[in-house]
Every structure is written in structure tokens, then in C-alpha cells.
Image (cartoon, grey):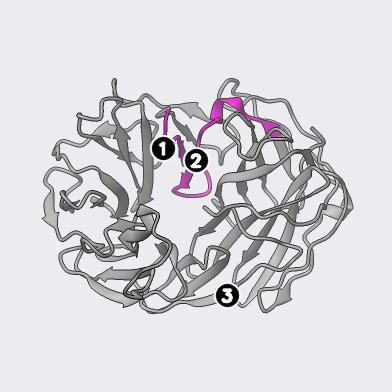
Amino acid sequence: MLAAAAGMALLAACGSATHDVGSAPTPAPTAATPAATTPAPTVPGGQPTARTGGEGMAGMVQAVSAAFPSAKRWLVLIEQCHPEAMSCPDGHTWLASTTDAGRHWSVRPSPSLGGVDEMVFHNGLDGWAADSEGRGALWVTHDGGTVWEPVAVPNGYDYGVSLSVAGGEVWGLAQPADPSTPPEILRGRASGSTLSPVPGRQRTDGLLVAGGANVAYIQAISPLQRSTGTTDAGRSWQHLTRACPWPDYAAPEGPPGAAGEELVIACRATELYRGVPKLADRRPFSILERSSDGGRHWSAYPNPQLVGDPTLVSARVGWATCDFTQVCRSVDGGRTWKTVWEPTESTGTPDVVVATSAADAAAVIPVSAGGRSSLLVVSTADGGRRWTTTPLPLPDR
């Protein structure tokens, strides 16, 4: 996720339903939006054109998570902040959804999903949502995100759950409230409704990513621990070489991108996490590390574009953020990256970037002016050559 940047006000407010996600099984109706909210023209070169219009929500909004289960079904989870707040700790939660690629949106209050910061989908209908910090709430949907049902988390492991989906499976790493207790590793069918502890326990705490059917990796955060991986659904775990070498680049920026045994991760210089603004020996601020053997061996690559949150959708194609504001794409397994979208003065920078295939990716961008905020979705279906801007109108609340 990226920090929001203010832009200009746009879009008319969309009618909203009052359905509380997770508390009532009745689907919320889709509200039709005015003609001015149809997608803006596609333009080449990664420079989308925004439409201006209504006022939007009061205060500041941020997209805390987004999912694009299919070409036309999109979901955006939104936090609305107090007009005078600089952050959103106590903001109101809204869920925006569309089934026609943004021509019509339903935007409804969803307090049950408050705190959720991850949404992952297996297909167009089966998805999971989790609060990775603080509450450990876990939810599942089987209708594309209209109705969410709570999922039980093991007792004592309610401090946060991180999720990853691949190969028809969903994996979870549940954090205990007691920091001396190791995390619980969970696994289940992505089309199911429960997650169960894996039979092979291990004590590594870190960043979880699923690599395929029966395959998962945990990248260790602490330099005192080793990374681990499994290829047999968690029955056994192998110690792997830790990426992000100590002491120079010991801090991973996020979980690795994974496609089978191909892994790529961004590592930030350790000094930056100690508050040192400059590296005395002029080492790069960040490097990329890649593995082609499931984390047994790693190779370092330069990262002049400050690639972050890399995602591999295949062994060769990946998507990431670059320089904190741009969308980048790789066609060589993460060795090199090319900017395929960058913000303009009218669009600002993304809160969330989601990639679903080698050709498809999207970003959610907040825009605001005069104390009112709305969102834009920029998306591509051809690997980033052309982008379409779709307004996400927010109700006047």
C-alpha cells in the first residue's frame, strides 16, 4: 500500500445501501450512478484522464484493500476519516463493489469489516479477508464479496492474520496475543469456509506467501531466524536461506512474490530503519533478491527504482510499485522493472495496487479537494500499454 496524495475533487455521489456486511445475509442492491460516472476514455502511455464532478465523502478516505476477482467484478474496502484527522484509526468502513467494471457501483457501510486490510480471491466468487494487525478477524465470501461470513480463528491467535492464496489453497499466519508463543500456520481450500492448523508445526515468525498447491514460504524477519518452506501442505518444513542479508539489507519491505519456486523480494538498507537518512558509504537504499529454487539460494540485483511489494503472476511476469508512486512490470522474473503507469497532477498516487495476471493490473487512487474525497480506479488489460480510468463515486456522508 502507498500513502495517499491529495488531488482534485471529482465525481457525483453514488446512492448507497445500508446493508452491514457480515451481519445480514441479504445482498445489497447495486445503485445506479449518473451518466457522468461511466469510465473515462482509455489513453495510451499510462496517463489516464479524470472526470470532474460531485463532492464525495467528507474528510479523507483511503483504500485499505482492493480485489479484482474478475474482469468486471471489483471490490474496494474504504476507510473514511474524520475531516480534521490526519490518519484513520477510528474511521468508518465502507465496501464499494461493482459487477460491470465500474459503470455502476454499490457503496455501503461495512463496520464488520473494520480493520480488515487484506482481501484475496481464488476466483470470481470465493474470497477471503483478514485483519493482519490487532484483531485477527477472518472472513470468507462465496458470492464475489456481497456477503461475508466470519471464520473462526484458533483460541489465543487473535492478534492478526495474514493471508495468501495460490493453487486453489488459502494459507494464513495467525499471530498470538502472547509474543512468546509462535504463530499458528493455517491452511484450507480456497473454495471452502474453514482454515485448519497445519500438521507440521514450526516456530519461524515472518512474512507468509503461498507458491502453489501444497507450497508455502515464510520469509523470516528477524536475522536470528531462518526462513522456512513446505512443499507437502505443511506436513514438513525445510530451513531455507534467509533473503535480505544481514547486516546491510536485513529489512524485507514485504512478503516475497512467489510463483512455484520462483521468489523475488525487496530488501531495504538496515540504516533506514534506524532513522539514518543517508548511507555513509553510498550503498543503494534498496536491493532486490531473487531465488529460482524455492529460497535455497538467493541472488542480489540492483533496485534503482525502489521496487516495493513485488508480485509474481508467473515465473517471468511480475508487478510492483516503484518509487512509492508508480506501477512497474517485469518480464524477466523480477530482475529488471519498467514503469508502465505514473501519476499525474490530477490523479495523485495509489493507495493499493493489485495484479491478477500477466496482462491485468489495477490501482486505486484517492482524490480530494475542499474537504471532500473520492476515488479513481486505473486499470490495464494489456500489460500496461494502455490504461482506463474509472471513477468510484462515494456518497455524500
Residue on which disc 3 sits = 340
Q: Is residue 320 visible?
A: yes
CA gap between label 2 and label 1 equals 7 Å
Secondary element type, mark 2: loop
Of the numbered discs 2 and 3, the one sitting upstream in the chain is: 2
Instruction: Report the front residue among 271 and 375.
Output: 271
Please name the residue shown 17% across and 69% down the image.
297
- Tell me the crowding category of disc 2: few under 14, some 14 to 19, or many 20 or more residues within 10 angstroms, Cα based: many
| Residue 89 located within the stretch drawn in magenta | no
Q: Residues within 10 Å of mark 1 (few under 14, many from 20)?
A: many
Residue type for callout 1? Ser
- Image position, residue 22 (x, y; %): 55, 25
Residue depicted at x 60% and y 26%: 111
Asked if the residue at tag 1 contacts the one at tag 2, i.e. Cβ–Cβ closer than 8 Å, the answer is: yes
**In the image, 3: left or right of 226?**
right
Residue 111 highlighted magenta (yes or no): yes
Which residue corresponds to mark 2?
Answer: 117
Mark 3 lies on a secondary structure that is strand
Residue 335 left/right relative to 347: left
184 left or right of 269 in image: left
Q: Position of residue 286 (x, y in %)?
A: 37, 68
Residue 204 is labelled as none
- Callout 1 secondary element: loop
Which residue range is magenta in the image? 108-134
* Amino acid on which the number 2 mark rests in the picture: Asp
Q: Nearer the viewer, residue 91 or 190?
A: 91
Mark sitting earlier along the chain (3/1): 1
